Image (spheres, rainbow, N blue to C red):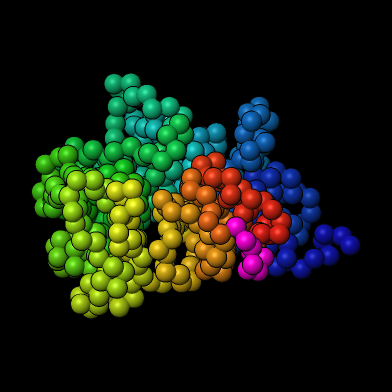
Amino acid sequence: MNILDLPDEMLLAIFNKMNMIDVLYSLVGVNQRLDQLIFDPLYICHLNARVNSLLNSNSNIANHILDRICEKIIPWVHHKITKLTAQPLSIERILYRMNYPQLHFVSLVDFGQAILVQHLTGDTKLRRLFINQITHLNAEINDDTTRELSDENNSNIFELILSLGKCLIDLTFSQSFRDREFEVPTLNITSTGCVSLTLTKLKIKVNTFDDCLYVLDGRLQCLSTFIIDIFEIFDSSAIIDNTVKRTEPTYIVDGIQLHDEVLIFMPQLNKLTFSIHTLVINKYVTIDLPSNDDIQHSFIKRKYQSVGSYADDKFTNSESRCHIYSLPYQFDTFLHLANCFQGGIFDKVRSLAMTDQRPFEHELFDKISRDFPFLQELIVLNSKPQKNKQRTSKLITFFHLVELDLQNVHTDYVEQFLVETNTCLPR
């Protein structure tokens, strides 16, 4: 069967699975039908200029391919493009050689901060687009090292984007260091003039609660949707207006705390989707921990109905954990699952991390395989040996699991997952 015997819908589905640069370089010019499909506005409107990893490792070949696409293809389609995804390798060749009158959505991936600052300062095409045209931006900044920028480029990139984005209404921003797996830089916004009068949606990862407070200090006057991933919450280290500072972390965040100390100060908020994990470490002070029923009642008392929770009602090695989350669960990551987990359906979750001071038994993994049906990544952190190693229950199957992290576990969990009579891992 010849590939040209396939219907148009199937050919477009194949194109969408392929790297777009490969499609443009290899298939344009083969025959009229393929050209018509590739240049269809519904396909070409999102120009994904990410080169595949093989080309990225050979810059000479990648440059040759990008140059050919810019010379032979972009002049015919530039007026149809509404969204552009670009890497540092492709942005100058793709973006700077042609005007894009319909371009309103830009996704910048794998940029280092210094490189992106260079593109946003001076009289550059990207800077002019930010000021006059771009309404939607996704910026993924990954720096190889944590060294500081030189003095002339020592700019807060988030601040710079806000100040330039005169038309920006939707911003997704993430910045991370490759040699610090879990840490993201602190925003540390210093300019009182750094405001946005247009931004309505912001999705961002930050390192501390201070960063959250900087963003919510009134500089984003039109913000209506705010999605934030905060790495850790400690006492505030800065003087910021309208903060709530806590100095005695000897309590669990429940419905009363969430309402009385956060939501009461946000009267215009009409929807909150949350996942909050509390870790209390207490060696010296005797406190009463709430049960899971107590936590559920704290939300019912405040008229929140669809909330899930699980909590330790006693300390183990001076630690106690609690997790509260809105239902249905909307996040693709689920962290710090412990033995007190109450169960539920979490069909959006793709990555799960488990940790506890008590052993994980076979029955808990069985529950997880059913409650997280589309799980792709599982991280287990537990040094305690299993107490019940008699496998009387059915074989556990994780149908979609492709990545399993057992670096910090007792050997019982290696047996739990890698002995085929215990667990089946078809992927």
Write the residue at 48% across / 71% down: 345
Q: Is residue 389 visible?
A: yes
Is 219 situated above or below 312? above
Q: Nearer the viewer, residue 69 or 337?
A: 337
Where's the N terminus, which quadrant? bottom right
The span shown in magenta is 389-396
Above or below — where is 195 with respect to 118? below
Say above or below: 73 vs 375: above
Q: Position of residue 191 (x, y in %)?
A: 18, 38
Tell whether position 343 is magenta. no
Determine whether, in the image, residue 253 is placed left or right of residue 368.
Answer: left
Q: Nearer the viewer, residue 107 or 122?
A: 107
Residue at image coords 41%, 50%: 357
383 relative to 177, above or below: below
Residue occupying the point 33% across, 61% down: 312
Residue drawn at x 62%, y 54% is 416
* Quarter of the image with the C terminus in it: bottom right
Image coords of residue 129 (percent x, y): 39, 44
Q: Is residue 232 left or right of residue 48?
A: left
Q: Nearer the viewer, residue 118 or 241?
A: 241
Location of residue 366 in the rendering, given as x and y in whole percent from the top left corner: 57, 65
Q: How many marks?
A: 0
Residue 78: in sight, yes or no? no
**Residue 66: horizontal and vertical position, in percent?**
62, 37
Where is residue 94, by image quadrant?
Answer: top right
Residue 258: quarter of image: bottom left
Q: Is residue 278 left or right of residue 249?
A: right
Q: Is 205 in front, or is 58?
A: 205
* Most frequent secondary structure within the magenta stretch: loop
